[in-house]
Structures are given as C-alpha cells and as structure tokens.
Amino acid sequence: MNENSKDLRSNCPINFAVETFGDKWTLLVIRDLMFKGKRHYSDFLASDEKISTNILADRLQKLEIKGVISKSTDPESASKFIYALTEKGQALLPAMIEVTAWSAQYDSLTNTPVDFMKTYKTNKAALIDMFKAQFKR
C-alpha cells in the first residue's frame, strides 16, 4: 500500500479522488493556481468565494501533504510563501478543463470565458498546451 491510500476507506479510484478533492474549497484552490496564476496566501484570500483563513491554511497544507502543490519561500520576501502545482497537480489540467466545460454547458450563469469554450470545442489539445505553458514560468 502506498502512502497516498493508507488512510482511505477503500482503494477505489473515485474514493481516492473524493478523499483528495472532496470538499467545496480544494478544487477552487487548484483552479486559482492553475487558471488564475495565484501564488501567495493573500492571492487566494482575494478570490470571489471568500475562503476563510483557517480553511485556506488547512486546504493548502492538505494539498501539500498529498503532493498536489509545493510551498517555497518567496525570494522577494522571506516572510511569504509561493505555492505552485507539482507535476501531480499539473496532471489534473485535462480534468479541470473538462469540469470547466461541463459547468459552462449546464450552468447558464457560469463565467467561463467565451474564448476558452471556443478553443475547447475546436482544439482541446491547444487549450491544454496553453495552460501547460503557464506552468513552465
């Protein structure tokens, strides 16, 4: 048994995902890292959903423990940390794009950018590559 599944209810792949992302904040933190370029604690606090400080600290810690994000000291300010998606976190990109497209299709009030959906429908691989390029910065 690997360290990722030692405390899970079962070894079902859906259960693994639920145990990793199964609350209302975790995917929003990943969204902010993946699509919105947020990197600092204060950046996440400024999100529209208004996550509380204790919940944010908990989710960041859990994602770091799970190996989805990394945390490093900001070279410009030793009292700040920079959060980034790890390779494991970046591997969520295709799933996050699919969830975004699903939401745009079934929620008429979603704020999914028109360009995102146009590219999704015409060249999904280019959309994935565009976001992957941002990870290299």
Image (cartoon, helix red, strand yellow):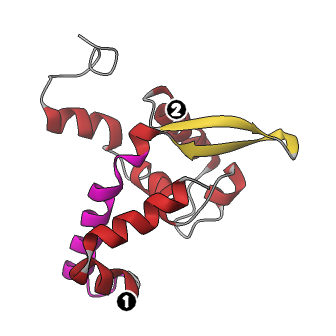
What residue did someone put label 2 on? 64
Q: Identify which residue, 99 or 131, lies in the foreground.
A: 131
Residue 76 lies in the magenta-colored region: no
Say which amino acid is labelled 2. Glu
Q: Quadrant of residue 73?
A: top right
Residue drawn at the location 44% of the way across and 52% of the way down: 25
Magenta-drawn stretch contains 95 = yes
Q: Could you say whether the residue bearing mark 1 is in a helix, strand or loop?
A: helix
Numbered mark located on residue 24 in the image: none
Provide residue 117's location: percent of width, then percent of height.
Answer: 30, 83
| Mark 2 closeness class: few <14, some 14–19, many ≥20 residues within 10 Å | some
Say which label, 1 or 2, has the lower sequence index. Answer: 2
Question: Viewed as shown, does residue 133 lie left or right of 118?
Answer: right
On the picture, is 34 further left or further right than 94?
A: right
The secondary structure type at the circle numbered 2 is: helix
> Residue 64 appears at what percent x and percent y?
52, 32
Residue 92 at x, y = what percent? 34, 49
Q: Is residue 6 above or below residue 53?
A: above
> How many circles with numbers are drawn on the protein?
2
Q: Which residues are magenta?
A: 90-110
Q: Quadrant of residue 75?
A: top right
Q: Which residue is found at the position 30% from the left and 87% from the top?
A: 118
Residue 136 in the image: state x and y as whole percent: 56, 53
Using residue 67 as the reference point, say whether residue 106 is left or right of it. Answer: left
Q: Quadrant of the N terminus?
A: top left
**73 on left or right of 112:** right
Question: In the picture, which quadrant includes the C terminus?
Answer: bottom right
How packed mark 1 is, by other alpha carbons closer than 10 Å (few <14, some 14-19, many 20 or more), is few
Most prominent secondary structure in the magenta stretch?
helix
| Amino acid on which disc 1 is placed | Val
Image point (69%, 51%), residue name? 40
Which disc is residue 114 wearing? Answer: 1
